Image (cartoon, grey):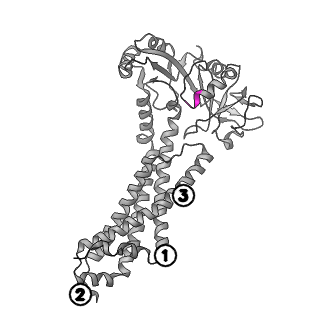
Amino acid sequence: MFPFKSTPLAWKNLTHDLRRLLVALSGVTFAVVLMFMERGFQNALFDSTVALVKNFDADIVVSSRARYSLSSSSRFPTSTLSLARGCPGVAAVHPVYIESHLAILRKPNHHGRPIRVVGFDVRSDLFTAPLEPVLRRYRHLLLQPRTAIIDAKSKESIYGVDPSVPRPSRPLRLSLANQSLLIPGSFELGTDFANDGTLFMSEDNFSEFFSFRGYPASPLSTADLGLVTCDERANVDQVRRVLQHELGSGVHVRTREEFIRAEISVWDSNTPIGAIFKVGVIMGFIVGVLICYQVLFNDISDHISEFATLMAMGYSPRYFLSLVVREAVYLAFLGFAPGLGISWVLFQAISSATGLTMTLPMFEIGLVLTFTVAMCIISGLLAARKLLAADPASLF
């Protein structure tokens, strides 16, 4: 009887007062930015924590069973990896050494700060692109004594040096663990919530700087991680099961993807940080619901007599419910667009200032858009109760 599309009433109600519309959009935009930031920080926590492992060109990762996260210091005997080399389907095995607690990097006449140091066989191709070409470029320099390259995203405010400036012709001269260190170049990896920077060096140099590890045995007698590369035709999961049986219960043998999921689970489920970010997203959603509800409720209140006229003319409750929901959806999309733009700018600024990996993948954009539409529709349904409960006779 009354075709809905004949008059864009929902759009007219929302846009007839530009000032009120801008105020409403600013509220929705704030909620969108808040949800994006909380999701961004949560993803930065997860992505940056596993960035090192993601860049390893390995099928299987071996670690001590006592090592609950990558930032802990539990190690296993390097001799354990010797057993892995003889297993069927294994193409190569490489130990990786990590030190962060006692790796104090110091600029002359400045206070020292801990930095994560990763030692490995620089003659082997252990990384994926884009790190591997960088390692190849500096390979001959990394084989020299007391030499390392630094993550260009290491925090300059912490270490007092610009990590993007070292060149082979102009190396940085610093101190690491009270020993002189030469840094002729840099790579890009990113910081995380546990480390403000990273150094890569050869295992021989690692042994020189951290000779106390494994005392009285060799500093390289214990490894932090073992990287296993399988033959191209081998079944990775089958090789993993064989390795777990051969290496014993003292170590975890996991595929790289399993290791990454386990690491993320530690931060997401076993630390308060993951819960804090989840609460932040929920709070952004609730704030958005309250703001949208207030906007739509006020709009209904201001036009209650007009709505009463339509009721008296015979328009059904379904029509009014659809009207309010449409207003809510318009509000969601109009507020989401500037929220996305502002979030992108903030992500770039935070990533540049902290070195954290702050990205806006399509999945996250779609997820926050879904949250935004949902919160506006919920607000619309709550606000529509006032209209649906009204008695037209009493409004004239």
* Disc number lying in front (1 or 3): 1
Q: Is residue 287 in sight in this rendering? A: no
Left or right: where 96 falls relative to 296:
right
- The answer to whether residue 130 is magenta is yes
Identify whether 5 is placed above or below 301: above
1 or 2: tag closer to the N-terminus: 1
Residue carrying label 3: 342
The structure residue drawn at horizontal position 34% and vertical position 64%, both measured from the top left corner, is 377
Mark 3 neighbour density, 10 Å: few (under 14) some (14–19) many (20 or more): some
* Magenta region: 128-132
Relative to 56, 153 lies left or right: right
Q: Residue at x 61, y 27 (%)?
A: 133
Query: Which residue is the site of mark 1?
Result: 18
> Which amino acid lies under the numbered mark 1 shown in the image of this protein?
Leu
Badge 1 crowding class, 10 Å Cα cut-off, few under 14, some 14 to 19, many 20 or more, is few
Q: Residue at x 56, y 43 (%)?
A: 356
